[in-house]
Image: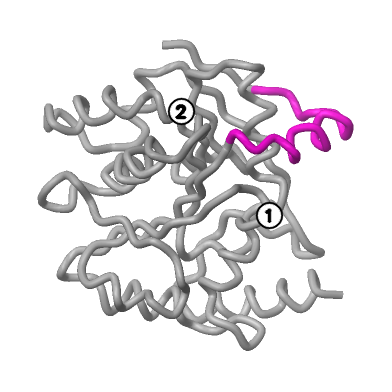
């Protein structure tokens, strides 16, 4: 399938894309099975600038999409504090992030006028504020192209824009059990990688995930800098 690297959009194109409301669903991903729930909850609830990390992610995503849901398995009441729909996998045995994408697509299929699902990770609080706008720009008007982020020559398939019309293709792919890798599915479809620059005075990758203590210290510094 075709792979494209989209050029950076002009500022006027960015403004136009940021107002495009065809992207009606944002899907924050935590692939939670029975074995890693405590660690995932510890990650998303650890505090940055005095607030749980997940709130930073929700606040950053909310202006970019019409609705937000969380992708997580288990008791949805554990995320009640965030007041968002919680989407469990509809594929058995926790096959990975693609199952969360499928759950998001199936949810979005019932939303009037929704054409795409934007996905982000649940432990990455500094993804670009223009993430969705840049991904929409990279579609070049195509309704059937997957757009995903890239930084420092590294692909970030969780940060992506997925056509809802691909829901049946994705389910067929997962049902085949041939592969559960996001990159394998993306590679079979028309797709493009959109490059994003580093942020802050320390030139931090906007897609770095906050896990070990040293990452939390870097996140605190960056949060303080971006708030000024």
Q: Which residue is mark 1?
A: 63
Q: Is residue 21 magenta?
A: yes
Instruction: Please give the name of the residue rendered at 11% of the width and 52% of the height, measured from the top-left corner.
Output: 93
- Region of the chain picked out in magenta, as a range: 6-22
What colour-coding does the image apply?
A: one colour
> Which image quadrant for residue 173?
top left
Q: Is residue 202 left or right of residue 178?
A: right
Q: Earlier in the sequence, mark 1 or mark 2?
A: 1
Q: Position of residue 137 (x, y in %)?
A: 69, 27
Instruction: Please give the name of the residue rendered at 56% of the width and 73% of the height, measured from the top-left corner.
Output: 55
> Which image quadrant for residue 179?
top left
Residue 111 disc label: none
Q: Which residue is mark 2?
A: 163
Q: Nearer the viewer, residue 184 or 105?
A: 105
Relative to residue 145, is residue 152 depicted above or below? below
Relative to residue 200, is residue 93 depicted above or below? above
Q: Is residue 175 magenta?
A: no
């Amino acid at each position: 399938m075709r792979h494209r690297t989209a050029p950076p959009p002009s500022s006027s194109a960015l403004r136009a894309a940021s107002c495009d409301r065809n992207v009606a669903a944002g899907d924050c991903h935590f692939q939670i099975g029975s074995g890693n729930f405590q660690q995932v909850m510890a990650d998303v609830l650890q505090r940055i600038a005095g607030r749980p990390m997940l709130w930073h992610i929700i606040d950053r995503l909310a202006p970019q999409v019409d609705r937000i849901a969380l992708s997580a398995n288990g008791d949805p009441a554990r995320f009640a504090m965030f007041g968002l729909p919680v989407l469990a996998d509809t594929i058995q045995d926790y096959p990975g992030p693609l199952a969360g994408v499928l759950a998001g697509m199936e949810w979005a299929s019932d939303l009037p006028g929704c054409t795409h699902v934007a996905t982000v990770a649940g432990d990455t609080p500094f993804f670009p504020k223009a993430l969705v706008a840049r991904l929409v720009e990279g579609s070049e008007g195509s309704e059937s192209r997957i757009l995903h982020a890239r930084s420092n020559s590294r692909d970030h398939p969780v940060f992506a824009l997925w056509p809802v019309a691909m829901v049946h293709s994705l389910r067929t792919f997962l049902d085949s059990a041939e592969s559960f890798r996001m990159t394998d599915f993306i590679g079979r479809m028309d797709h493009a990688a959109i490059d994003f620059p580093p942020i802050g005075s320390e030139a931090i990758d906007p897609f770095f995930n906050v896990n070990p203590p040293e990452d939390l210290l870097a996140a605190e510094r960056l949060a303080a800098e971006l708030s000024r």
